[in-house]
Image: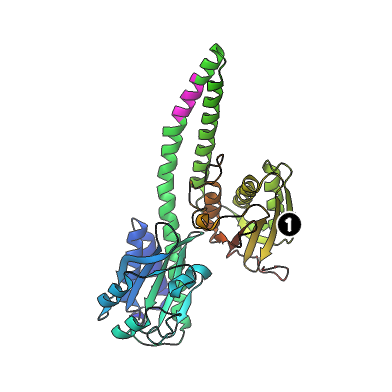
Amino acid sequence: MAGERSPPELLREFAETARDGDSFATALQRTVSLVCDATPWVYVEVWEPNAAGTALVLSPIWAGDHEGIESFRADSEGVSFARGEGLPGRVWESGEVEWLRDTASADPEVFARARAASDVGLGAAVAIPVTDGGLVAVLVFYLDEAHAESTELVALASAISVDLSAAYLRAENERLEEFVSIVSHDLRNPLGVARGYLTLAEEQEESAHLQGVAEALDRMDHLVDDLLSLAKHGTPGQLSAISVREAAERAWGNIDHATATLSVVDDQPILADENYLVELFENLLSNAVRHGGPNVCVELGLLPDGFYLEDDGPGIESIHRDSIFEPGYTTHEEGTGFGLAIVKRIAGVHGWRVGLGDCENGCRIEVRGVDGSVTEGARGR
């Protein structure tokens, strides 16, 4: 229980537990088990995005020996929560910790499983997000009685959220480092050989078919470059106060934007790795021009906790909204599908969240959770 360890000892133990797992799933299981062993929480459940990324479903990872908990889990098996729905869905949407005083007596619209919680004697709950720029999971911790919000327990839950987000990022970095090695060697070398043979063939004869081969090899080069860029973004380097305007305008000068226009309506220094921030804007702006057309108008402005990039292009159909940040997903025939995945990756290593705003009349991408972005000038639209 919490009384057996001081708060600093608990924080240190949770950080070590999350860090020492040989995989994220192991770190997650050990962490939720420690929660039930060392704190007043009697049950912890984990909600993860489904394969389509459209809803949260119950994970097989959990901990707790509260009487009747198997029945509560059985009642939860067929339940799913869309963004904004139920306790897990609200935390998914907000990206913030949420405390619920009493799950058993809550309105079903607030807590859909209130009756099942009452049947097994569950009370207060707190839900936390685990993120990497997007949502990885939502954890819900339960007490066995109703309880007003506890500053100490909310602080502990918030620390666990940070520890697990860092653990996920470390696991991803290790996986991607291995991937980089494979891509660098097993793809670059054959591409170099193919280009050598293509050069020899072009010296011997002219053929439209050879031009098609050259274009295919160019596309493969771009794809490999994007894969390596996605993989390289680990822990950011030196963080400093960087002007949003200056980073975006520098990125704008680095891309082919044809006759498109960029309007920066607000400016504010934010704490970031400068090179990463410029690359984030390069990918966001390239995406806007590629999908919005050569004459697209792009606007950059501030939010109370971040910034947005909005264009007046064709927007994004609802069927694509949950997939556009996934690696390799593209709706453009010349795209590699890694630009927005790189944006998500860069945001994640800074501890930021990236998501879509209103995309019916154009596309709006929002980056939130940004240090140093709260300002009276923020439009917060």
Residue 238, relative to residue 95: is it above or below?
Answer: above
Mark 1 neighbour class, 10 Å CA radius: few under 14, some 14 to 19, many 20 or more: some
Q: Residue at x 54, y 37 (%)?
A: 222
Q: Residue at x 53, y 42 (%)?
A: 336
Query: Residue type at mark 1?
Result: Val
Front one among 374 and 239:
374
Front one among 180 and 3:
180
**Which residue does the numbered mark 1 point to in the structure image?**
264
Front one among 117 and 109:
109
Examine the residues drawn in magenta and state their main secondary structure.
helix
Magenta stretch in the rendered image: 189-197
Residue 195, relative to residue 361: is it above or below?
Answer: above
Q: Is residue 276 visible?
A: yes
Residue farthest to the top?
A: 204
Quarter of the image for residue 81 reads bottom left
Q: Is residue 241 visible?
A: no
- At which x and y percent is residue 299? 70, 56
Front one among 81 and 188:
81
